[in-house]
């Protein structure tokens, strides 16, 4: 009888202790309320009143490790340990279930913390500029993660489980060593902004075009030779950055990118453009420097919203007479082509503010040039 009473009392005390700890934990705060909470910048000060600490920043403190007592900050929701000398994030931080934001950029971190799957409320993870070589499969448990920044690490691949990050909206994987994206990457269907520039990607498979909410896609400086035929499925795209690849053609489905405003294709291997590009009527900036174009793509004159057009470093011999139909053009770069004369209609580009034609074998009568230069009095012309 006495033993039973003692056992019951012990169970009660254990449950009561757990209850008190849970009760001490505060509810999750939204970003607006969280930003108003006091920002502690000393771990010693924070440990004097651990239950009051919601935000902790230990930035540029030359730390090579975090104190284990950080797990006492049971209400911690924002942790910034950027610009230190950390080689790892301790497993102790995974005992802080309310953590929503972790910023650990510019350290020497080689891996994500063991037990990261317990950070069920993590929304924002920034481990950019570190030495991370791989991601654990357990990353799939971060069901609330919306922003992930792993820029400038040493990632060569991503686990298939990456595709389970189905709330992910912003992802920066630039400046790594990725040669491909996992097949299940296309399951990250909430992605809005994706940066995979400065990697070694050679191919985007057709499943990639299931990321139909993408608005910004950056793939600059990879090894791409082609784009998915179903590119047009990414119909929410506003910015598509593909410079410094080896792309030889653009799929006709680009005509479906009705919201596209910026298209960068400098330094690829394009010899022509699809006529369907002329249907992307809201395009404002188009960069085609350093390709293999041997004529001015006439379809560009359909793009009435175009403000910036760069075609330097091609082999274009002439401009079309209807160049003036690009009525909103403000910047036109034509340097280092083989243009011998400019059409009179260029003087009708009344919004033009910058004209670069240096490095062309212009043989046109200088009086003719002076005439339209007077018409374009507000335009800076660089022609020698």
Image (tube, rainbow, N blue to C red):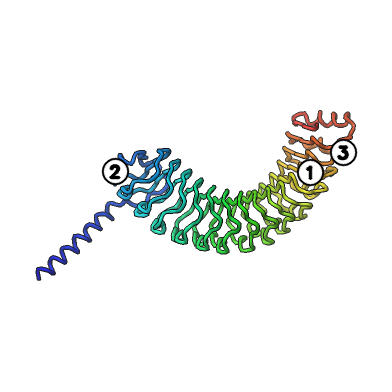
Please give left or right for residue 36 compared with residue 373 in the image: left
* Residue farthest toward the left in the current orientation of the protein: 2
Return the x and y of residue 120 as percentages of the image width and height: 40, 57
What is the crowding at mark 1: few (fewer than 14 residues within 10 Å), some, or many (at least 20)? some
> SS for tag 3?
loop
Can you identify the residue that label 2 sits on?
47
Please give left or right for residue 196 compared with residue 224 in the image: left
Mark 1 to mark 3: distance in Å?
A: 21 Å
Sequence-first tag of 2 and 1: 2
Q: Residue at x 61, y 60 (%)?
A: 208
* Nearer to the camera, 131 or 302: 131
The mark found on residue 242 in the picture is none
Return the x and y of residue 112 as percentages of the image width and height: 44, 53
Would you identify the image quadrant in which residue 61 lies? top left
> SS for tag 1?
helix
Can you identify the residue that label 1 sits on?
325
Q: Residue at x 84, y 29 (%)?
A: 370
């Amino acid at each position: 009888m006495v033993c039973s009473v003692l056992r019951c009392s012990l169970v009660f005390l254990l449950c009561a202790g757990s209850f008190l700890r849970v009760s001490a934990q505060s509810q999750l705060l939204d970003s607006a309320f969280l930003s108003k909470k006091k920002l502690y910048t000393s771990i010693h000060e924070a440990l004097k009143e651990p239950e009051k600490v919601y935000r902790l920043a230990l930035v540029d403190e030359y730390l090579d490790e975090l104190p284990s007592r950080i797990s006492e900050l049971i209400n911690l929701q924002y942790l910034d340990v950027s610009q230190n000398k950390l080689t790892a994030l301790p497993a102790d931080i995974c005992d802080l279930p309310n953590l929503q934001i972790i910023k650990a950029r510019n350290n020497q971190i080689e891996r994500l913390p063991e037990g990261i799957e317990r950070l069920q409320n993590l929304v924002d993870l920034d481990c950019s500029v570190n030495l991370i070589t791989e991601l654990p499969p357990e990353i799939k448990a971060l069901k609330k993660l919306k922003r992930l920044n792993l820029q400038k690490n040493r990632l060569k691949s991503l686990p298939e489980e990456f595709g389970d990050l189905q709330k992910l909206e912003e992802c920066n994987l630039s400046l790594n060593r990725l040669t491909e994206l996992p097949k299940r990457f296309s399951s990250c269907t909430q992605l809005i902004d994706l940066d995979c520039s400065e990697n070694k990607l050679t191919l985007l498979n057709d499943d990639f075009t299931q990321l139909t909410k993408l608005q910004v896609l950056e793939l600059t400086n990879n090894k791409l030779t082609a784009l998915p035929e179903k590119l047009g499925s990414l119909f929410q795209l506003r910015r598509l950055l593909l410079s410094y690849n080896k792309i030889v053609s653009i799929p006709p489905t680009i005509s479906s990118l009705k919201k596209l405003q910026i298209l960068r294709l400098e330094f690829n291997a394009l010899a022509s453009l699809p006529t369907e590009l002329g249907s992307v009527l809201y395009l404002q900036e188009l960069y085609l420097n350093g390709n293999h174009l041997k004529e001015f793509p006439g379809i560009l004159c359909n793009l009435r919203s175009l403000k910036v057009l760069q075609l330097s470093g091609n082999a274009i011999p002439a401009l079309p007479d209807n160049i003036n139909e690009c009525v909103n053009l403000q910047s036109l770069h034509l340097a280092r082509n083989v243009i011998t004369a400019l059409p009179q209609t260029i003087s009708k580009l009344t919004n033009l503010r910058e004209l670069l034609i240096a490095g062309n074998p212009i043989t046109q009568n200088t009086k003719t040039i002076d005439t339209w230069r007077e018409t374009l009095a507000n335009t800076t012309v660089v022609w020698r």
